[in-house]
Image (cartoon, rainbow, N blue to C red):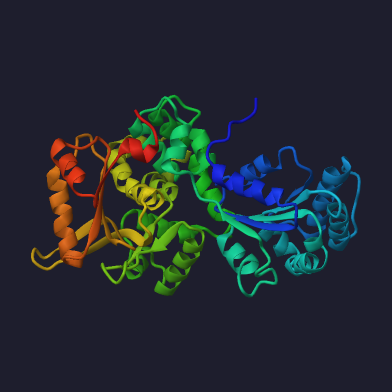
Amino acid sequence: MEERIIGRKNELARFEKVWDSGRFEFIVLYGRRRVGKSFLIDAFREGKNGVYFEAVDGGTEVTQLRLLSRSVSRGLYGSENLIFPDFISIFDDIAKHAEAERMYFVIDEISYLCESCPEIIGLLQHYIDTTFRNSKLVLILSGSSRRFIEENILGRQSPLYGRRTEQIKLFPFTASETAEMFPSWNIQDIATAHIITGGIPYYLKFIARHDNILQAIHDEFFQPGSSLFTEAELLLKSVYRKTGTYESILIQLAGRTNEVNKISGKTGLSEANVSTSLASLSSMGIVAKKEKIAGRGNGRGWEITDSYFAFFYRYVYPYYSLIERGRGNAAYDNTIRFLDGFIAKRIESEFREYVISHSDLLITSIGSIDFPNPFQKRNEEIDLFGESNAGWIIGECKWQNSPIHYDVFNLLEMRKTLLVGEDKAHYFILSKSGFADDIRKLAVEHDNIHLVTGEDLFGRSF
């Protein structure tokens, strides 16, 4: 049975538009592992002619050449018998076929090919400039390493700089796309599935195998050898030869130790080592440095931005040895006790994404922020703070089982005044369980107060 495509409608439309142009096109597609790049490419390739090649991690040049030969033979000649002596012969053959017919040439995981064959990028540049550009070829380079793609394919120092005609960075599912995968689940269970997987489609498929979220968490995270129990280690090992340093840092961040000197003190790693490792994890999209927004806020420390990693290193990794021995039930029970609070905190980032994509405001910066309250000698927090063309963005996220009242707006307005004074602002308040009449009335009377429900966030009624 054909697999139903969830999400990715805009990305597929961009691929089809490129295909329909009829001229040479060069697409760069990238995003973290498991985000669905290959699935998107496969959906695009359906019913079209061309060559698809997935490079091998750690493969030698001979291995890559033989596998690419097989892909070309299969894609262009319907067999796997042709052997090409070198990459030049392959590119010549592809260029010849693309002179007369529309076809694609996909190199998936391009960084693996370049590791064993460093001349590939220069060779591609030569063929784009001399042969491919006069053909009907759609060239697609895809990769999971953001740093490699941005530096070696898209960067100014790359031979391919300025030659791509389309680039697509593939992000995890939005909250509403995740909701499509669970048509019968309630809002809290869908929110939990979305957060603990980080919205990664591949991970969500494992969750969707179960009738309810609690069984899914138990079986996929707290059983030895289970899919999401082993995934974090597999992903790190695909990038790093030794993962111990990175795991030590991630467990500190998950436990809310987020400054370099404090992480250094608790792990025994030098501050230089911690800083270098954090920068590398940042290039993978796993962590990010907290920055001031428009010069406001404390802006210090680091945080785990990938929600799957945040969940794993907070609740699973500390009990790794127990789970491996089949004794993970106590760790599972401990996780369930704190699960709702974890989800409520992590849903803030989904709220920010919702505001960016659904607001008519031109938002130039956005994030969460903490700052000192000089009157009460304490820190204040704002879940959503940013700049736009029409004033500041001020927001509060309340993922709780009771409606929100007027007092939440009063608190938000107080914090706004402390931070930016009487400047114009737009207020956004997210409530899982709706809003009381008093704050609804206020929102009707003021067009700068925007109320967002859980149903809005997940794109359907419950």
Left or right, 13 with reference to 140:
left
Q: Where is 311 relative to 152, above or below?
A: above
Instruction: Tell which of 376 and 124 is nearer to you.
Output: 124
Q: Residue 279: where, in percent of width, then height?
A: 47, 67
- Answer with the quarter of the image where residue 46 lies: top right
Location of the C terminus (image quadrant): top left
Q: Residue 128: where, in percent of width, then height?
A: 77, 65
Q: Residue 460: where, in percent of width, then height?
A: 38, 32
Residue 221 visible in the picture? no
| Count of numbered tags | 0
Look at 80% across and 65% down and name the residue there. 127
Q: Residue 63: where, in percent of width, then height?
A: 80, 55
Left or right, 16 with reference to 228:
right
Q: Outermost residue, left direction?
A: 375
Left or right, 372 with reference to 106:
left
Q: Where is 335 relative to 142, above or below?
A: above
Instruction: Tell which of 11 and 316 is nearer to you.
Output: 11
Instruction: Tell which of 26 and 301 is nearer to you.
Output: 26
Look at 41% across and 27% down and name the residue there. 212
Left or right, 290 with reference to 395:
right
Location of the N terminus (image quadrant): top right
